[in-house]
Amino acid sequence: MSATDAADTTIRPDTTIRADTTDAAGTALGPRFREALAEAALVHQHQRRKGSDTPYVSHLLAVTALVLEHGGDEDQAIAALFHDAVEDQDLALDDLAARYGERVAMIVGACTDTLTDTAERGAATWRARKERYIAHLGEASPDVLLVSASDKVHNARAILVDVRAAGMTAFSRFNAGPDELRWYYRSLVEIFGDRFPGPLTDELSQTVAEIEAFVDDAALTRRHDMSAIVDDVQVKPGTPSRLLERDPAAKLGVGDKEAGAARLAERIVELSDLQNRLWAESSRSVLLVLQGLDASGKDGTIRSVFTGVNPQGTQVTSFKVPTTTELAHDFLWRVHAACPARGEIGIFNRSHYEDLVTVYVKEIGGRRDRSWWKARVRAINEFERALSAEGTTILKVFLHVSKDEQGKRFHERMTDPHKAWKFRMGDLDDRKIFEAFMAGYDRAITETSTVLAPWHVVPADRNWMRNLAVAELLVEAVRKLDPQLPPPPVELANGALVIP
Ligand code: ADP
């Protein structure tokens, strides 16, 4: 560029910006636009893009660029610059109308959340707000559709870039989960396809399809990884449990504690959603049976896996040495009474397997004969079959801790004042017959791992592995049920109800 060219294009401080005349098509950008550009940058100066450091104005510039590239005029470009200013920065529509004209204010108003009242906006759910927005696009003018489609194209592009870089965790910056966002963008593609066909909508449709492909791929990989863990720990019905050959410190291909913790965090989110649906559906239940020798981590597993779930839909029952009343009944009496109701996830901290293994190994009541064992196994298998026929998914987990690790944990309980409350003299007695307990569980697991109520031997020397494996088993079990939210009451279907 020559010195003269440079001088021609440089705006010096004393230069007055000359008003351009707008051509017949109204496409020339004049001082109004330049003013709007500066004002939008100022209004949004402290705002950043969700979950990043990128100045918010980048989004406004990109949307404006899309509007102009797709034939937008000056009013539409100005509206693009301000399309979020009313909602995010409380700019008054009247001010916009006074400065830039009614048409600009009308477009911005239509791009703004239709619930402008802050209290009302705060009260409406994310889904309700988006449903309103989509319905509103069904009636919006072409002016509005151009700006809105440009906005959605740029947002969809940003999501795609993020999911490529950060995987599924990219969704954590949104108020909605991946499934809800998917529904929203799919609905946008449909409404724009109807109302605003053309290159912009094509681009939106392609970007959304790419995001969907990514999410589906991630779900497939996740399911594959999950199935790998589930496969490793499950005792196939009709095969020996091989309890003694399994490694209590196995990592099952997960890598390390950090990787395990990240995966657990995802499972907890998933479990929360699935449990909510199970609870709402209220027709089936899940029973998690947790067995394991002392200090295998039954309490810790429950604490960590169920952190995200609604306590209302879960019920934990700890089975202790039976009381006199309990002993006056059949051994399944107290167990049956504690089984989860429809919609619930029931957690057994110890279970009817105490009535088989502990009673046998410790020869409680002199029970040590083979026919007694066989009768109990039969009773348990029949009981579980009956529960399953009534809609309970049974998941049995043996937390497999090594004798060394148990010894370390006992030592901690005996020396750490914060853990001393867990110490029980009886635990030391049971440790003396550790091997007999293991042999008892080996046999019990082999004989009671059925198609309807399979056993899983979860390595429990590492807390993170134990928690992750149990979380994955649960998520997979509830996911298979695919619980559905019940349809809304018929009275809501016609939308004519008014809140009195
Ligand atoms: P936990 O160790 O589960 O935290 P406790 O220290 O109270 O709780 O232990 C419960 C004890 O009750 C265990 O030793 C367990 O073997 C025993 N127990 C549970 N159910 C039975 C049963 N049906 N018959 C005999 N003993 C049982």
Image (tube, rainbow, N blue to C red):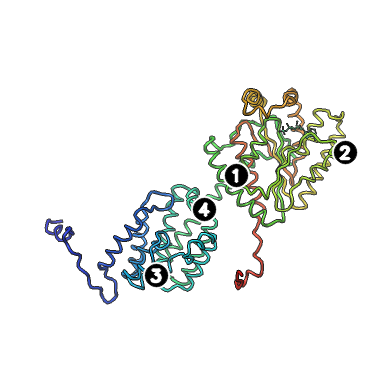
What residue do we see at 55% from left, 42% from top?
A: 263
Q: Earlier in the sequence, mark 2 or mark 4?
A: 4
Q: Report the amino acid beneath label 1.
A: Met
Q: Residue furthest left?
A: 4
Residue 358: assigned label = none
Quadrant of the rendering where the C terminus is positioned: bottom right
Q: Which quadrant of the rendered structure holds the N terminus?
A: bottom left
Q: Nearer the viewer, mark 3 or mark 1?
A: 3
Q: Please, is residue 307 above or below residue 83 in the view?
A: above
The Cα–Cα distance between marks 2 and 3, rounded to whole angstroms, is: 76 Å
Task: State the CA–CA distance, disc 2 to disc 1.
Answer: 43 Å
In the rendered view, tell whether residue 261 sits above or below residue 122.
Answer: above
- Numbered badge on residue 226: 1
Q: Is residue 335 something one can see in this rendering?
A: yes
Q: Is residue 145 left or right of residue 268?
A: left
Q: Residues within 10 Å of mark 4 (few under 14, many from 20)?
A: some
Position in image of residue 489 (x %, y %): 66, 66
In primary-sequence order, the first of circles 2 and 1 is 1
Mark 3 or 4: in front is 3
Nearer to us of marks 2 and 4 is: 2
What's the residue type where badge 2 is placed?
Ala
Task: Say which element carries label 1.
Answer: helix
> Disc 3 marks which amino acid?
Ile
Q: Where residue 254 sits in the image (x, y, percent)?
A: 56, 38
The residue identified by callout 4 is 215
How far, Cα to Cα, is label 3 from label 1?
Answer: 48 Å
Of helix, strand and loop, which one carries label 2?
loop
Give the residue number, with chain letter if any, for mark 3.
107
- The secondary element bearing badge 3 is classed as helix
| Residue matched to label 2 | 328
Counting residues from the start of the chain, the first of labels 3 and 1 encountered is 3
At label 3, counting other C-alpha atoms closer than 10 Å, the crowd grade (few under 14, some 14-19, many 20 or more) is many
